[in-house]
Image (cartoon, grey):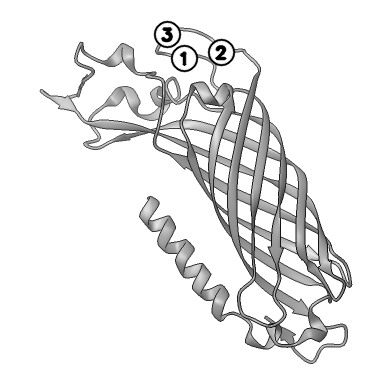
């Protein structure tokens, strides 16, 4: 999974580099209204209640964004897929033998692993504080917005022979959690007027006010009604694919 995401990110970077030769050599359109699409990759550390469940995680996301004419202000939507490989708890201990194996539906022992999965999606407003007056969209960028945040434990049953982790039974072990969240980003954005590379990079923060979406945890035969504070603190870099529209266009530059 990590290799496929990395290759996808590399491909999108190359497309960004080759994208829009006309746009990036015409200064007249740089502060016109238009869309940018940000393809991002990030690394996060958990805090709050999440720290008890997971280690660090990666994020891969997209963020279509609209810039208003002659403005450093924008609005957008972003969606990120979260994946990590360190799960600190063992929700399936009640299914395991003394040596932490699970007997399968046949005469043998099944092989499986646990990992972290999640999504975070929502809308944001953004403002760039430019270094130069003629390029309003290069400088310090700050984002803020409301989001939906969810995470769960993903089980991979290599042989497909563990009925206890299939269908409705899996819901008793995946610890699916989610709820409302806030996002903040602060970093540097470079929206080039003279080259083919545009990007941003900085620090991103999520504060999730979450609860369990499952009625019962099978591992300890309990009900989880606790309200949680799930936090992520991370770094993120994004490659930007811009599309600008002139006020009286004969062409759309991209």
Element under label 2?
Answer: loop
Kindly check if marks 2 and 1 are in contact, taking CB atoms under 8 A apart as contact: yes
Element under label 3?
Answer: loop
Q: Is 135 on the left-hand or right-hand side of 213? A: right
Q: CA distance from mark 2 to mark 1?
A: 7 Å
Dot 3, crowdedness within 10 Å: few (<14), some or many (≥20)?
few
Disc 3: which residue: 220
Kindly check if marks 3 and 1 are in contact, taking CB atoms under 8 A apart as contact: yes
State the quadrant of the C terminus: bottom right
Disc 2: which residue: 224
Element under label 1?
Answer: loop
Dot 1, crowdedness within 10 Å: few (<14), some or many (≥20)?
some
Of the two numbered discs 2 and 1 on the same chain, state the one appearing first in sequence.
Answer: 1
Disc 1: which residue: 217
Q: Pinpoint residue 223: horizontal percent, then vertical percent.
A: 54, 10
In the displayed structure, would residue 207 be above or below residue 30?
above
């Amino acid at each position: 999974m990590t290799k496929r995401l990395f290759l996808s990110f590399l491909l999108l970077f190359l497309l960004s580099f080759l994208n829009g030769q006309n746009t990036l050599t015409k200064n007249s359109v740089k502060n016109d209204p238009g869309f940018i699409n940000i393809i991002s990759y990030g690394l996060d550390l958990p805090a709050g209640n999440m720290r008890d469940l997971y280690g660090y995680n990666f994020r891969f996301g997209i963020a279509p964004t609209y810039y208003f004419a002659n403005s450093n202000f924008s609005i957008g939507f972003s969606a990120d897929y979260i994946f990590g490989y360190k799960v600190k708890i063992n929700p399936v201990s009640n299914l395991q033998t003394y040596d932490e194996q699970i007997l399968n539906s046949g005469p043998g022992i099944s092989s499986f692993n646990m990992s972290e999965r999640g999504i975070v999606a929502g809308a944001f407003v953004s403002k760039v504080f430019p270094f130069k007056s003629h390029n309003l969209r290069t400088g310090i960028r700050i984002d803020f917005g409301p989001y939906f945040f969810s995470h769960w434990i993903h089980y991979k049953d290599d042989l497909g022979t563990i009925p206890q982790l299939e269908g409705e039974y899996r819901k008793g072990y995946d610890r699916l959690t989610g709820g409302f969240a806030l996002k903040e980003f602060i970093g540097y954005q470079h929206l080039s007027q003279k080259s083919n590379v545009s990007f941003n990079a900085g620090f991103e923060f999520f504060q999730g006010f979450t609860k369990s979406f499952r009625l019962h945890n099978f591992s300890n035969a309990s009900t989880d009604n606790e309200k949680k504070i799930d936090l992520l603190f991370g770094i993120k870099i994004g490659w930007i694919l811009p599309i600008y529209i002139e006020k009286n266009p004969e062409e759309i530059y991209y």
